[in-house]
Amino acid sequence: MKVMFAFILLFTNWYYIPKDSPAVPVKVESIDLKLKNDELAVTFFSLSDGEASLIHHGSNKNILINTGGIGTEPELKKLLQLYRTNKISTVILTDEELYNDSSLAWLIKEYNINQVIAGESIASHLKNGKMDLSDVNIHIWARNTKQLLLPGLHAEVLYEGMNTGDGMDLSLTFARHRVFFMNSLSEKAKNVFMKKDLSNVNIVKLPAFGREESVSEDMIKHMDPQIAILFHKSSVKPNSDLFRLLNEAWVDVYYTRKHGTVTIKFTDINYEVITIFQEDELK
């Protein structure tokens, strides 16, 4: 079952339109996902540039995947405040293009982050860089790493490459749901994916902001997801053929530039889709 709600941000206030009522905005100060102890949600933030996703767990623990683009800290802070997030335990960095040192340093200080997870290349950069990470544990994840991230949430690294265009490709499984954060573009990575059983992927985060040849028709058919998430990068125009391929495959596409921030709330048997818009995204 999929349920969609529409939320609107006007100026500094947040509004939502109830599903079964006329389009009359109702003001809210914050969003309470009302997660039970055994429930989970993933939010894909709509930023002016870059990727950042928040994993919310019913135990009140939060994990951020990537940091957003340079200069998007104020946007990210407002969105985290909206979701009542004042502490993040872990940041996962999946790709050198999807994080930056200044945003990471700000997040660590602002949200008391004590753990960073990354591939070997990023981890080496952090350990040898100028950032003060003395109070942060840096964990290196490699291909085939498997770990219980949060109660009921299982993570597996399907691929982790060192070549240009490669990153860490992360599969998250919760109950009967599976979210695939796809990042790598190399032929080697694509061959690995095609040999894996991805038929139970419900949601795929598309790689490379939808650049040309980021995802092939064969890959879409191989996964056959229900939902595809595409982030926005100011310097990248998504390939129109990608939208066509996804539409022809009956995949619901949520492009953050067009559809706003997307939250998917999971229970043990179903999920709900919540979309949030800023004023300029409604024009």
Image: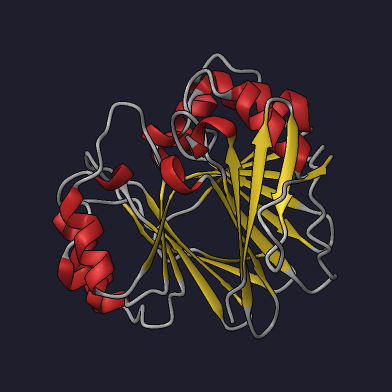
Closer-to-camera residue (248/24): 24
User: Would residue 272 be visible to someone looking at this image?
Assistant: yes
Answer above or below: position of 220 versus 51: below
User: Would residue 133 be visible to someone looking at this image?
Assistant: no
- Report x, y in % for residue 2: 58, 75
What residue sits 69% from the left and 29% below the top?
Answer: 77
Total residue callouts = 0
| Residue 233 falls left or right of residue 99 | left
User: Quarter-wise, where is residue 164 in the image?
Assistant: top left
| Residue 65 falls left or right of residue 38 | left
What residue sits 52% from the left and 44% below the top?
Answer: 260
Q: Which residue reaches farthest front? A: 22
- Report x, y in % for residue 93: 50, 41
Closer-to-camera residue (202/164): 202
| Residue 244 falls left or right of residue 116 | left
What residue sits 72% from the left and 38% below the top?
Answer: 80
- Report x, y in % for residue 191: 18, 67
Answer above or below: position of 78 versus 44: above
What kind of colouring is applied to the model shown? secondary structure
User: Quarter-wise, where is residue 132 in the image?
Assistant: top right
- Report x, y in % for residue 173: 56, 73
Q: Which residue reaches farthest top? A: 130
What residue sits 59% from the left and 27% below the top?
Answer: 104
Answer above or below: position of 77 versus 169: above
